[in-house]
Image (cartoon, grey):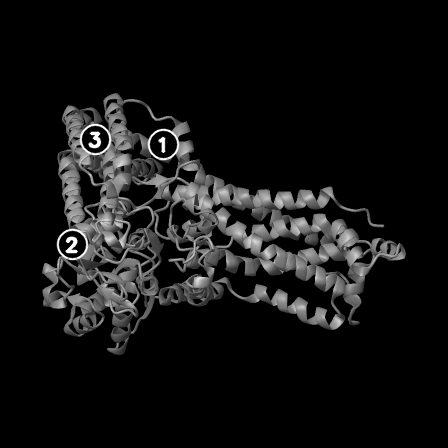
Amino acid sequence: MKKLALTLLVLASAAVAQAQSTLRIRGSDTLGAKLIPSLAESFKKTGGKVSFDIAAEGSSTAFTNLASGTAEIGMSSRKAKADERTLCRSKGVALNEIEIAWDMITIVVSSKNSVSDLSKKQVMQIFAGDITDWSEVGGTPGPISVYTRNTSSGTYKDFMTLAMKGREYGKSSQKMAGNEQIAAEVGSNPNGIGYVGYAYAGAKGTKIVTIDGKAPNPAAVKSYPLSRPTYLYTAGEPAGTTKDFIDFCRSAAGEAIISKAGFVALSAK
Amino acid sequence: MSSSTSTTPGSLGSKLLRKGRDSVLGMDPQKIIKNFFGANSGITIVVLVLIMVFLLREGAGFLGTYHQELEVYRKAGLEFCDIADTPLKEQQLLTSALRRAKTTTDAALKTALTDAEDAFDTAIEPAAEILLELKTHATETKELATEHHTLEAGRQQLLEAAAGTSDAKHKADLLKEAELSKVDAPDYAERIATMLERRGELSQALTDYTTALETAAATLPEAVSDVKKAVPAHVATIRKATENLQKWSWEEPVSYFTAVRSFLFGSAWITNSSWHDIYGVVPLLVGSLLISLVALLLATPISISAAIYTNQFATDREKEIIKPVIEFIQAIPSVVLGFIGIAVVGDLIKGISQWELLSWVPGFPIQERLNIFNAGFLLAFMAVPTMFSLAEDALNNVPRAYAEASDALGATKLQTVFRVIVPAALSGILSAILLGLGRVVGETMVVLLVAGNRIAIPDFGDGVGVIFQPAHTLTGIIAQELGEVSRGSSHWQALFMVGILLFLISLAVNGCARAIAKRFEHSKA
């Protein structure tokens, strides 16, 4: 919901002519809802004379905006796809990729649910719609409600690759606009299941499901099956304010914020 | 400016509005004013036409693009894999039923079921493995095709730019870049041949699976007789799939008719897929229609009764309260209503549905707080002011002579209202309802937040309970996906096609409303 307000704000501010010292950042909701705004705040506090204009509507928007020149930085929770690279290339934009933090996609269910561990195969079958009832995975009988991100999200695509062997989501999955909404729906529905970025895993009424006994743990990112790097993209080599901001994100101060926001800093891997 | 230099206040206005010899730029001020007003009403019409042209222009390419994608879908062998995939999908449903039955406490039955499930799974494995390899191969072919297509489009752009420039060096640069992005089209025949080599192997694997399955099904315990009964149908599916695999040919051209049909009558809308994007509009259309229907059923009685009461029975005092209050509803932003839908209405409906008293209601107890009914309820709330105002106007327009005549014949007030006035205003009331529907169909924010966004045709097996299922809508899908697509891609064009469809629906609804109002206009007595 915060994302929505943010978007509206941005839409309002987009009408105003862009000042030179504005960094326009577009893309992933996972990065743009909490992490990047808090990095931006700290960057401004440390004396960065710049105003930020952040809109987080899904990773795909990072590349469409970079290609059309409407953003200085794109946030993405996945690597750029071949056709996105080609799109940027055809517009004369050379994509430059910067790994910024690691995220762990976390499976959440209602805290009322008796299931607390799923195998990787079961996760795939639930989200692909093969398993439709909690009794099939040892829970209380009841139809499973699957909540996913919507198709513009990098997490949506990443989850397909990481957890579903590239299979399609089941027909009955419900596409939510952001991590917050998924957490809210799972929290209100005893038969719900969904996935969120690790930063959102502590939401009210939800609990984390371990995968093959492994809980997401910042100290052991590599061993958790649904870990993924997240990226910032720029058009060509970053320079000026853009470069300053990215350097700040990768500095010790930036990494402290990254860890606090529930992501894993690169040095901590 | 007028040529007059008079300074008396108001003289300019009076000069402009009366016939005189003053002229501005050689034109009569009377004419200027008339033309100014005429131009303003003209602008709205021009803008509307421009919107239509824009929609059509963006959507027009869809058929060609989608047709081409469907051709790649066939030529790259994705279709072949999907044919082989149907029995595997069905197998999943069967094992799912077995797993569900395993909640039993009977240990012997549990063991039997576990064995059966294992047997089912091992039986399908060889076929599944072959299919996975084929799928990987097909995806590679498709990627090659996509890359070729994108680069080719970029190359054409570069060549065009090169042709249009006069600067020799720049031209050379562009041509060189175009030369660099030259990629050969994938050799479909060769790539598909490697797939078809394995056709026999795949069919054999499916046949083996059938045998193993029938053996396993024979020993199934009685507790899962439904699975037992479903086996023959499943075997028939496998046979049919095997036949289709034999018949399938990659060279068969895809007709444009197929592209149109799969858009208008397709039952799946799958985008940003790693396999194959499908644009079928039916689930969205059904969602939109169901939500509108619920909204209409809720809003019509409330707004029409309120209009009749306000117009016919209310005291002046009451009118002063009712009218502004109902019209104030329009001032509530739809985003706010959406919040209310999530935070209040959803939980309220869900809470009520869990009462023992109401367990007889179809669809109760409900699982999803975001559903068709919730969205319909909020939209009904939004449609009430529109319907109320228009219906009230319609009642107002009934000539007073009707009511007076009715009174003179000795009818009671109620008789007058329900036998004379309402029937006379019926056409106006009907068009009020239709315009309310138009208001509801186009609403986006509320359905995006509250409808639950499940892109599937709701399961009508629940009867009326279907309204407690989540759904996605035509407006919702545009809002949710338009921000992410690259301009001019098939997805982009598909969303514009959805926009055109919405436009046509609104046009039809408004057209009906106008036609009804015209048809039954009573003579102003």
Q: Is residue A51 above or below residue B368?
A: below
Amino acid type at mark 3: Asp
The kind of secondary structure element at disc 1 is: helix
Q: CA distance from mark 1 to mark 2?
A: 40 Å
Give whichever of B432, B227 is nearer the camera: B227
Separation of disc 3 and disc 2 at Cα?
Answer: 43 Å
Mark seen at residue A119: 2
Query: Image point 43% across, 41% down: which residue?
Result: B282
Query: Along the line of sight, which residue is nearer the eye, A176 or A129?
Result: A129
Dot 2 amino acid type:
Ser
* Identity, as a three-letter code, of the amino acid under mark 1: His
Q: Quick one: quadrant of the N terminus of chain B?
A: bottom right
What whole-number distance in Å separates the C-alpha atoms at marks 1 and 3?
A: 21 Å
Q: Is residue A187 left or right of residue B432?
A: left
Circles 1 and 2, Cβ within 8 Å, touching? The answer is no
Q: Mark 1 highlights which residue?
A: B67
Q: What residue does disc 3 label? A: B184
Where B494 falls versus B385 (above or below)? above
